[in-house]
Image (spheres, helix red, strand yellow):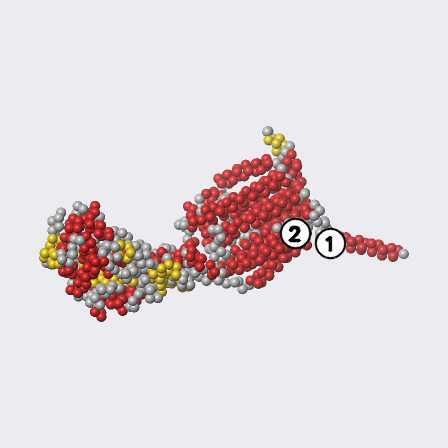
Amino acid sequence: MHPLSRRSTELGLVIMAGTITTAAYVLASLGKNSTIPPIIVPFFVILLGLLLLAHLATRILARGADSTLLPLAAMLHGIGFVMITRLNDRLAGLQTTWSFVAIAAYVATLLVVQRAPDLARYKWTFFVLGAGLLLVPLVPGLGRSVGGARIWVNIGPIRFQPGEFAKILLALFFAGYLYERRELIAASTWKVGPLRLPQPRHFLPIAAAWGFAVVVMVGQKDLGSSLLFFTLFVVMLWVATERATFLILGAVLFGGAAYASFRMFSHVQDRVDIWLDPWSRYQGKGYQIVQGMFAIGDGGLGGTGLGQGRPNLIPAVQNDFIFAGIAEELGLFGATAVLMSFLLIVGAGLRIAIRAERPFEKLLATGLTTLLGVQAFIIIGGVIRVVPLTGITLPFVSYGGSSLVSNYILLALLMRVSDSTSRRIGELPDDPTINERFAAWKLRRELRKQSGGRRGAKAAAK
Amino acid sequence: MNKQIRRLAAGLLVCYLILFIQLNLLQVVKRDELATNTNNNRAVLRDFDKPRGNIVSADGVVVAMSVPSVDTQFKFQRVYPTNDLFANVTGYYTYAFGATKLEKKFTEVLTGRTTEQQVRSITNIFSGEDNTGSVHLTMRADLQQVAKDALGEREGSVVVMDPITGAVLAMYSYPSYDANLVVVHNSTEAEQRLEFLNNYPGKPTLANAYQERYMPGSTFKVITTGIALENGLIDFDSFWENETEYLPPQTTNPVENYQGNVCGGDLREVFRRSCNTPFARIAVELGVDAMVAGTQAWGIGEKLPFDIPGAVASNFGTVEELKDNVARLAIRGFGQDDDLMVPLHMAMVASTVANGGQMMQPYSVAATLDHDGGVLQTTAPAVWKSPLSATNAAKLNELMVGVVQSGTASCCLQLNNGIQAAAKTGTAQLNARGEPQRSHAWIMAFAPAEAPRYAIAVVLKGTTAEISEGTGGKLAGPIAKTVLDFALTLPAG
């Protein structure tokens, strides 16, 4: 495919995603109230406008970027949105607002970050910001515990989860740090008995940073994020150093940490017990997951139809359990479509990583894709009992502003890496970015001013 | 780094493959297992958010319907407009305590879930029109009301049948209950009411007409006579000497006639006067094997093949039980001891005589229709048992006419317009000798005798002094007369 036709492909796919979402919205309304929603035309127009805005921003700001990421995200976002409107009118209104903010964040990210390699320079800034955001919920007065996890922050009427943004910042930090020191870490020239370890001065800072983040997340009882973050770190270290030792070390460390937390924390034990046998805990902590499985089973192959199931029987279905609601109303077909969408995003993300020429961009794309792919796996796996359930949102699909906005930022960064690569490998002319043009314009003006001034001076001298 | 990234891609692919497999397990393989889990009430909830079809009587009265619910819990509320009149037929359909009777049996039709309805309503999927089916009874609400009024507040049952088809035309038991009471959506309230009804004397939630059985008394003599006629043991020329009691073998306890009367004569006379000793003698002479086989030919010992679930079986006894106890065989020959008859079965016995010896399968549902009124299924009349030859059926018919003309039912079953009924009464003695009189009052009949259109069985339980001191003819006879008189004014078919 010619790099320039990517945008046309994207446009077609985005319109398709918008149309499917609108059709689903109508079906959900028909299923629930047997009426066609009265706001269907404005709904379609605004939805399409929003998607076209994102597309146009991409066309202008990242025209060489991958063509499937935005439509896939839009599709997941659309399915999630329809489910939320079908579940709860009040939340639907809030999610609409968040959708606007998310698209704005996507455009803003593309606008602010115009050269991916520039990000590497700010790695410590990102770490400090990320660590700061992680710690905010612990500040008395600001932080809030919801469902046992202290990961919320209330500022005025707005409540958000800073951790969602911290993950991206920390992935940026890892990519920036590892691209610099990956060879030094990989060399492992420090001999401790029979073991060859990386020199502490190279390895310690990142290990400390990572350890700090994990301890904070565990302390906040945010098991899902701890698991996600742990995986992210090990994967990035492994890819950066190209040494499987780190993968094995990570697995061993994970086993140890998991066992220790299982012994130390009752809420971890609870999660494992519920995972192994939710049935006998139906009246208590197993209720949510059992209801989730009833819903999924009820969906069968084709689902009950949008608006015709009873996903509201599952507590918190709009957040962690939205996948169960989708599997109920859209059946195995719909649930598989969601799985496939995530798999395609993962595929596109990792293709971007492979195509990228510079290690920093490779690591960044790998890290961001891992975040998205593993997060979806952890929560879907938790809902359908492949892994113990840990509360975490399903990217793009679940209700929640922080999750939606942060995932669109993540998407924009992936798009940016993809676009940078296209320019670098010469698929597209590496035109100056808007920022650069602006800078150049300012420079020229400055020069004109100076030369004009000189001319004036000369004239005065005459 | 590319090698690692490719491996990462492969690893994530495997992870998602596992998710896909588990999803298949939950949504396809274990689907039914999840659906039938005791904690899973999704199927019930689904049904309560959808309309449910009507159950309609043969004369067009809606006896069960769905109306939009006033509470917010569910969209629809089940209503039984005739209150207690058909509760033993429709049963109830509750959220927390399941469904019973026809509501249970025809739930697929009523909710539109049968494959045929799904296929037929495929064009309605988008219009959202409901595809609920309806159940059409063989029973008439007007006849049912007459039966109910005739029974009054006396415990017992009235069953009216079409003897030719086996269609049940009326079937009412007192006490009944108002099914509206238990279909309230509030589970606690429903539970309390259901518990109250289940513990109420007379068991209103149990359909006495087909879920209970009572000692039949002399009405059983129709069966004994039928068996003896079929075996060639007796005929119109048989004769029994006058006697007050008969001592069967293996006992010192003689069999007595009703109130110790002297009784005897030819078959017509002993049948019409309902002597006990001749029928005790017949049973003994036939012997255990022939009597047991004979009663089995009448369907005794088998659960009645009724289309409302839960029908029970009448009882006579087994060869093992009776072969060394001829005394009890003798008593059972005229309907006492452990003889037990389901009221519906007694109506079927009357129908058999009326129908030339063919016992039809009883049924309460004439047809099920889809949402457009298209027929889903109609009930075709079917023979269940053939205990009598046509000749012997005619003889029994004649014997039963004698009962009405000059026998135990002569007092009370002279129908309007001179229509001749045929009948047999029964007064089932429940008390042992020396105890106060306690008895069930029975009558079984059909009319017109020469071309039968209706068969009826009435039983009044011996729970009050009035009933216990009366006889089947005097107590149950007038009820049968009222009901038959009304039925005979109805247009044929």
The residue carrying pointer 1 sits among few (fewer than 14), some (14 to 19) or many (20 or more) residues within 10 Å by Cα, namely few
Question: Residue sitting at 22 percent across and 64 percent down?
Answer: B449
Question: Residue sitting at 61 percent across and 50 percent down?
Answer: A69
B96 or B212: nearer the viewer: B212
**In the figure, is residue B254 to the left or right of A1?**
left
Residue at mark 1 to residue at mark 2: CA–CA distance:
26 Å
Check the image and name the residue furthest to the top.
A193
Query: Numbered disc 2: what chain?
Result: A
Q: Are marks 1 and 2 on the same chain?
A: yes
Helix, strand or loop at label 2? It is helix
**In the figure, is residue A157 to the left or right of B417?**
right
Given the image, on which type of amino acid does mark 1 rest? Phe
Q: Is residue A147 above or below residue A205?
A: below
Confirm whether residue B328 shows in the render: no
**In the figure, is residue B453 to the left or right of B284?**
right
Question: Residue sitting at 46 percent across and 59 percent down?
Answer: B122
B226 or B483: nearer the viewer: B226
Query: Numbered disc 1: what chain?
Result: A
Image quarter for residue A14? Answer: bottom right
Q: Is residue A98 above or below residue B320?
A: below
Residue B445's x, y, as percent? 22, 62
Tag 1 and tag 2, C-beta contact below 8 Å: no
Q: Which mark is residue A438?
A: 1
Q: Name the residue under label 2.
A: A6
Please tell me which of labels 1 and 2 falls first in the chain. 2
Tell which tag, 1 or 2, sits nearer the viewer.
Answer: 2
Residue B489's x, y, as percent? 27, 69
Pick the quarter of the image with the C terminus of chain A.
bottom right
Residue A46's x, y, as percent? 60, 60
Confirm whether residue A434 shows in the render: yes
